[in-house]
Every structure is written in C-alpha cells, then in structure tokens.
Image (cartoon, rainbow, N blue to C red):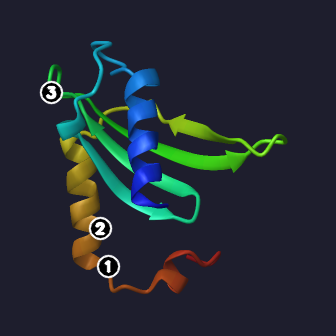
Amino acid sequence: MHFNQLKEIIKHLRKVVPCNQCERKFEPEGIQVLSTYGDEGLFYFSCYNCLNQLVIHVTVVDDNDNEKSLNIQAANAPEVSKNDVLDIHNFLAGFNGDFKNLFSETH
C-alpha cells in the first residue's frame, strides 16, 4: 500500500468505525499501522476517552466497475486477562522454538 492509500483508509476508518465502547471517533494519534502486505493492512486503534483497544484488518478489493472498496474486519474479542498473559509467558519460557513439533498431530 502506498502512503496516500494508507491515509485515505485511515480517514475512512475514522469516519465509519467509532469506538465500540464509548462510540467516540478515534483520534489520529491513537491509530497505528501494524502491517501492510499487498492490498491488505492491519491497524491498531486506541481510544483516548475510554482506553478501549481495537485491531482492524482491511482488504482493498476491486469491484466489478473497477472502483476500489474496503473489506473491514474488526473482531470484538474478549479482553486479555492477566492469567492469559501469564499462561503465554509460562509457555514461552519452556518453548524450544520447534513449531513443526508443536503443530504436529502427535503433539
């Protein structure tokens, strides 16, 4: 994605995606581009009003009339708890980096 395209996407997201907790618009300072690849982008939104956080996946698609449109996906996932963080920390402390073994059917 080009810089101008990213600016337009963020402008559009600010217009159509309010905070799902307090319904306010996200401030530009609370928006980060996490990743882009081809016509896809991953964005992090943080609400300064209520401290809610949102991760949004965007795919730019070509419609039949050659106009570009956005496919926006925002997951309304449960909050990550302290126990969730500790579980991951404990797992990673003993993890040897062998993903093949981790995801094998015999594991």
Residue on which disc 1 sits: 95
Q: Residue at x 54, y 84 (%)?
A: 100
Q: Residue at x 33, y 21 (%)?
A: 19
Under circle 3, the secondary element is loop
Quarter of the image for residue 31 reads top left
N-terminal of the pair, mark 3 or mark 2, is 3
Between residue 43 and residue 69, name the one nearer to us.
Answer: 69
What's the residue type where badge 2 is placed?
Answer: Phe
What's the residue type where badge 1 is placed?
Answer: Phe
Where residue 60 sits in the image (x, y, percent)?
Answer: 61, 48
Q: Residue at x 23, y 36 (%)?
A: 28
Where residue 18 sits in the image (x, y, percent)?
Answer: 37, 20
Residue on which disc 2 sits: 91
Q: Residue at x 46, y 41 (%)?
A: 9
Quarter of the image for residue 34 reads bottom left
For the C terminus, which image quadrant? Answer: bottom right
Task: Specify few, some or many for label 2: CA neighbours under 10 Å numbering under 14, 14-19, or 20 or more.
Answer: few
Residue contact at pointers 3 and 2, CB within 8 angstroms:
no
What's the residue type where badge 3 is placed?
Answer: Tyr
Residue contact at pointers 1 and 2, CB within 8 angstroms:
yes
Between residue 40 and residue 3, name the one nearer to us.
Answer: 3
Q: Which numbered disc covers residue 48?
A: 3
